[in-house]
Amino acid sequence: MKKIINQPDQVVDDMLNGLAYAYDTIVSRVPGTTVIVRNLESDNRVGLISGGGSGHEPSHAGFVGKGMLSAAVAGQVFTSPTPDQILEGIKAADEGKGVFMIVKNYTGDVMNFDMAKELAELEDIDVDFVVVDDDIAVEDSTFTAGRRGVAGTVFMHKILGAAADAGASLQDIKTLAEKVNNSVYSIGLALSPATNPEVGKPGFELEENEIEFGIGIHGEPGYSRETLKPSKELAEEFVRKLKKEIGWTSGDRFAVLVNGMGATPLMEQFVFMNDLKTLLAGDEKLDLVFKKVGDYMTAIDMAGVSLTLLKIEDDAWIDHLNSPVEVIGW
Amino acid sequence: MKKIINQPDQVVDDMLNGLAYAYDTIVSRVPGTTVIVRNLESDNRVGLISGGGSGHEPSHAGFVGKGMLSAAVAGQVFTSPTPDQILEGIKAADEGKGVFMIVKNYTGDVMNFDMAKELAELEDIDVDFVVVDDDIAVEDSTFTAGRRGVAGTVFMHKILGAAADAGASLQDIKTLAEKVNNSVYSIGLALSPATNPEVGKPGFELEENEIEFGIGIHGEPGYSRETLKPSKELAEEFVRKLKKEIGWTSGDRFAVLVNGMGATPLMEQFVFMNDLKTLLAGDEKLDLVFKKVGDYMTAIDMAGVSLTLLKIEDDAWIDHLNSPVEVIGW
């Protein structure tokens, strides 16, 4: 394992301190916790938190700040935060109007966020949540019943953040979150595995010219191992799978996220986007009303890319995606 | 070589098209050229361009937009754009008040940007430039006489962009650029080599637990190969080298950039920043007035990190670093 770290079991602590220091104009670390909270005192809105295992940076602390999350809770690498840690996040986010939690669909996360909700309710904080399950690659997985939550979560952060800023109630946000979750679809592939520093070796192995379609953001198995193909053919596979799932017709409006898995350079992500342009905007005649390319939901140092499509069901979603934010990673 | 690309010799073309499509609200590709120009019609300022070989994304096209560059010119991977290509960039940036070019110190770039200046002057466009040479690791290098230009160039983009927006003349910008260049210092290290897709194999080799201090952003040799050390010791080496060069005293003000080389995850970059906090703000008692962490000046898929320190010689520089921009990558 070749990494710029100190003690492997201190990597999350060191990382959170480094992040909070680097961006001390935007966020702070709540002392004695794994919570990154925005500095903004209050803007009188529903609190919005997310979190989960570390290793997906800039998710989720990179999306804390004005216009997006109120706070993010970090677990150890690829490990859910505990209910107590999440409770600290809820408290940090609470402005008296309730707190909404964006949870990715992993068994540990769902269980622990749910327990944190109960703990918070004992302290008279209203809490509700959505479980994001946007990954269409497989049903059930190593750490998941149903579908996994992956990069679509970032669109959820952005849209709910804007809605919260606009004065949406806890119930409004819950309704919106369910609608967005029903409209967001992702699929990924890996060229190389991730190495969890707390483990010290790669989570799986791929041959020299082998790739895996449908990989999860913790290296969970996908649906097919194949030889590396040109970008255009990789894009075709993604589009074929997504079209089958979504069943779009020409003119449908989508937001698009091409997401790097951590070690894939922007050069390749932009090449991939160029092929998607030909397929989605060209051949399929979709209306891509919002586009983004970069590392948003990573798997530490995995090489690979994912594609997220959000079907726009409401014009307000486009405004929410475009509204200004003050965060590290959007 | 395992990359998400199509024809290796088409990678720059595909990438520029993908970038221009993804961010068509901010930039456009000038047809028939390798120039990415901002959509903003004019804000009546000195034009500001940069560029060089591709492979350093988001540099430089990622810094085109309101508040930063007017345009960026891309060469083939790790290869200077030609004078004709640069001339197109100058024309795209020109608003009648002259055009300033930010050039990294590589022999090919310096020669070609200088020739482009002469071509532009034949067309009655005033052009001036700065050659950024912030890399303190080595004197002279594979493609360079003197010191190489690396991640400090990104601070140059930001400061000159803000100054141009504030109405600085071509001569003002030239003076400011020279001051900034005399105050900016960088040093980098690699954990793994970059693979130029047009070449197809890594530019150099490192053993399993070996790193190289002082590496260049095209994989040019550094000054020392050593076994991998903990992050804290890597940071100590950088701080020792930079202190010797700069000769700071406690209380001196600096802007800091921790820059990922392309394949190093944010997790490690934030750990590294945490160690720099201890060393620079703690032990050395420097006043770090502006901080940034992420991939800004990459070497395709190299794993590694660089540290840039800009000694603040004028309060206005801090305002310039903090002013809002509308670009892809800042």
Image: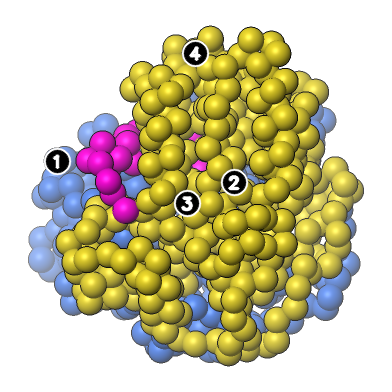
Chain colours: A yellow, B blue
Disc 1: which residue:
B44
Q: Total number of numbered labels? A: 4
Amino acid type of disc 1? Asn
* Residue in the image at 86% along x and 59% along y: A199
Disc 4: which residue:
A97
Which secondary structure, mark 3?
Answer: helix
Disc 2: which residue:
A104
Give the label, 4 or 1, closer to the camera. Answer: 4
Residue A112 shown left or right of residue A273 in the figure:
right
How far is mark 2 from mark 4, CA to CA?
23 Å
Amino acid type of disc 2? Lys
Which secondary structure, mark 4?
Answer: loop
Q: Nearer the viewer, residue B64 or A13?
A: A13
- Using the image, determine if residue B206 lies above or below residue A47: below
Say which mark, if any, is on residue A152.
3
Amino acid type of disc 4? Lys
- Decide whether residue A102 is among the magenta residues: no
Mark 4 is surrounded, within 10 Å at the Cα level, by few (under 14), some (14 to 19) or many (20 or more) other residues, namely some
How far is mark 3 from mark 4, CA to CA?
26 Å
